[in-house]
Amino acid sequence: GAVVSQHPSWVICKSGTSVKIECRSLDFQATTMFWYRQFPKQSLMLMATSNEGSKATYEQGVEKDKFLINHASLTLSTLTVTSAHPEDSSFYICSARDGLAFGTGELFFGEGSRLTVL
Amino acid sequence: AQSVSQHNHHVILSEAASLELGCNYSYGGTVNLFWYVQYPGQHLQLLLKYFSGDPLVKGIKGFEAEFIKSKFSFNLRKPSVQWSDTAEYFCAVKGNTGKLIFGQGTTLQVKP
């Protein structure tokens, strides 16, 4: 299947700093990418939908100024956690849909990025 | 709004036992249904999916799921589990919004 890669896999930062997480589709063009957040022992919660060349659509309750999403190209979306606080510590997962295979509906997931805010 | 409910939060089975994990969804329109698995320390992997046609879907590693439209269900089954099936299982639904919404997940522990 298609490959989605996230970087970094894990990051530790101090409270108040900003962290950027990258999501790349390695062998396909992703017109749409999704960002999820997963708390320990819990399910994936959709944070936002990222469309190439346009503003992201955020789910209810997700602060768009806190979680900045940029989808500048067909293979890269970034999530920036601004002014991070310990409660932002979580596992962030991106997924991408092959633009040419829209009808299949299948999403391909990255490995996830574990953020720990001290 | 779409929602997905998985009834079993934690299931413990012995090897060779049969498995059935429940999944119900609420959405009035056409849906695509998925089961994903997350092995310890690994990322999500697709087990199987349903888009249309035969409601009994066969996936990888001997898993299958049956879409029952009248019950809004998509239960996952496996006749005989193995220790290596120990993992977290997520049911997910995609409606016409294109968003994939996940259930709460079921932790399966298979005892050797």
Image (tube, coloured by chain):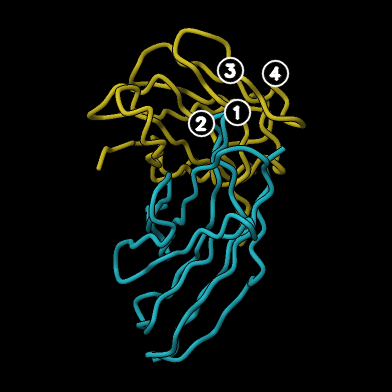
Chain colours: A yellow, B cyan
Residue B5 x, y percent position in the rendering: 67, 58
Q: Pointer 3 and pointer 1: residues touching (CB < 8 Å)?
A: yes
- The structure residue drawn at horizontal position 37% and vertical position 13%, both measured from the top left corner, is A73
Q: CA distance from mark 4 to mark 2?
A: 17 Å
Mark nearer the N terminus (3 vs 4) = 3
- Which residue was labeled with disc 2? A34
Amino acid carrying label 3: it is: Ala
Q: Nearer the viewer, residue A108 or A19?
A: A108
Q: Earlier in the sequence, mark 3 or mark 1?
A: 1
* Contact between labelled residues 2 and 3, with CB atoms less than 8 Å apart: no
Query: Looking at the picture, does residue B75 appear above or below residue B12?
Result: above
- Give the image quarter of residue B60: bottom left
| Mark 4 to mark 1 CA distance (whole Å) | 12 Å
Label 1 near label 2: C-beta < 8 Å?
A: yes
Circle 4/circle 2 CB separation < 8 Å: no
Same chain shared by disc 3 and disc 1? yes
Q: As rendered, which of B71 and A96 lies closer to the eye?
A: B71
Q: Amino acid at mark 1?
A: Ala
Residue designated by label 4:
A65
- Pointer 1 residue: A48
Pick the residue in front: A20 or B28: B28
Is there one chain holding both mark 4 and mark 2? yes
Q: Quadrant of residue A52?
A: top left
Residue at coordinates 67% horizontally, 35% vertically from top-left?
Answer: A15
Per the image, label 3 sits on a secondary structure element best described as loop
- Distance from Cα at disc 3 to Cα at disc 2: 9 Å
Instruction: State which chain disc 2 sits on.
Output: A
Q: Earlier in the sequence, mark 2 or mark 1?
A: 2
Question: Which image quadrant for residue A62?
Answer: top right
- Local SS, label 4: loop
Of the two numbered discs 4 and 1 in the rendering, the one whose residue sits closer to the viewer? 1
Name the residue: 70% across, 43% down.
A86
